[in-house]
Structures are given as C-alpha cells and as structure tokens.
Image (cartoon, rainbow, N blue to C red):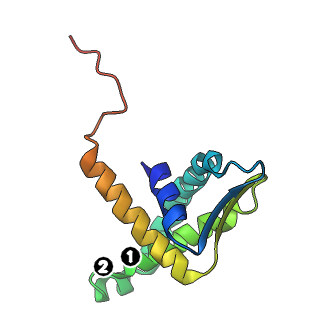
Amino acid sequence: MAAIAVWVTALIVPGIHLTRGDGQALLAVPEVSAVLGLVNALVRPLLRWLSCGSIVLTLGIFLVVVNSLTLWLAAAITSNLPDVGFYIDGFWPALAGAIIISVVSFALSILLPAGTATADFRS
C-alpha cells in the first residue's frame, strides 16, 4: 500500500519528482517505498520522542511535520541511489506529500480488507 501511496503522491504533488535512469519511473516506486519504510522504522520514533512536547501542545498536528521530515529524509537518501531519483523541492511539497501519503494509505486500508495479499488455505 505504501508503494501505491508514493506513486500517487508523485503524480499529484508538483514539487515531488520520481525518476529513474532508464526512463521507467514506475520501477523506482518499490525502492523508494523500501527506503521510506526503513526511515519510518528507524528515524521516525526518534523524531517523535524528540518532538513529544510539540506533539502534545498541538494535539497531534505536529505529527504531520514529523511525517514530512521523514519523507524528505527518504527523498534525500534515494536521490543518492544509482538509477533512482526521488526528489522533493522543499519543505512545503514534503508536507503536502506526507498528507497525501497518509490519506491514500488510509483509504487503501479501508478499501482493502486485512489479509487480501495472502492466500487462505484453510479447509
């Protein structure tokens, strides 16, 4: 679901660019999603802990800023990978991208029931 959300975000937000060396940008989506997943798993908890006071004061709205910073960091990492280009032009496109990714991921989690990607072998 994260790969679809990243792809939709690259299509919608004007400051987010998804490219690949061979011209097939769609093939870069799994790599970008993997890096975003690693950044979310490793860096995001630290950012949430460091910004705990701001999150409480803003009643959770500051989490959008934390999400946009993790998206921006993932773009910085993937832009240095060979044949993968995921570029964000600044903070505001990263903020818009974080919101779009959250909305698309939420919508997909509502539309697709849990466990649809696995086969059910119960008899």
Q: Nearer the viewer, residue 29 or 39?
A: 29
Q: Could you say where residue 51 lies in the image, as x and y percent from the top left?
A: 43, 81
Residue for point 36% across, 28% down = 118
- Residue 64, given in percent of the width and then of the height, sits at 40, 76
Q: Secondary structure at mark 1?
A: helix
The answer to whether the residue labelled 2 contacts the one labelled 1, judged by CB atoms less than 8 Å apart, is yes
Is residue 22 placed above or below 97 in the rendered structure?
above
Q: Is residue 4 above or below residue 65?
A: above
Question: Which element carries disc 2, helix, strand or loop?
Answer: loop
Residue 62 percent location from the top left of the image: 38, 82
Q: Which residue is mark 2?
A: 60
Q: Is residue 38 left or right of residue 114?
A: right
The reply to whether residue 41 is in sight is no
Q: Amino acid at mark 1?
A: Leu
Nearest the camera: 44 or 73? 73
Count residues near mark 1 (Cα–Cα under 10 Å), then give few for <14, some for 14-19, many for 20+. many
Kind of residue sitting beneath label 2: Gly
The residue pinned by badge 1 equals: 63
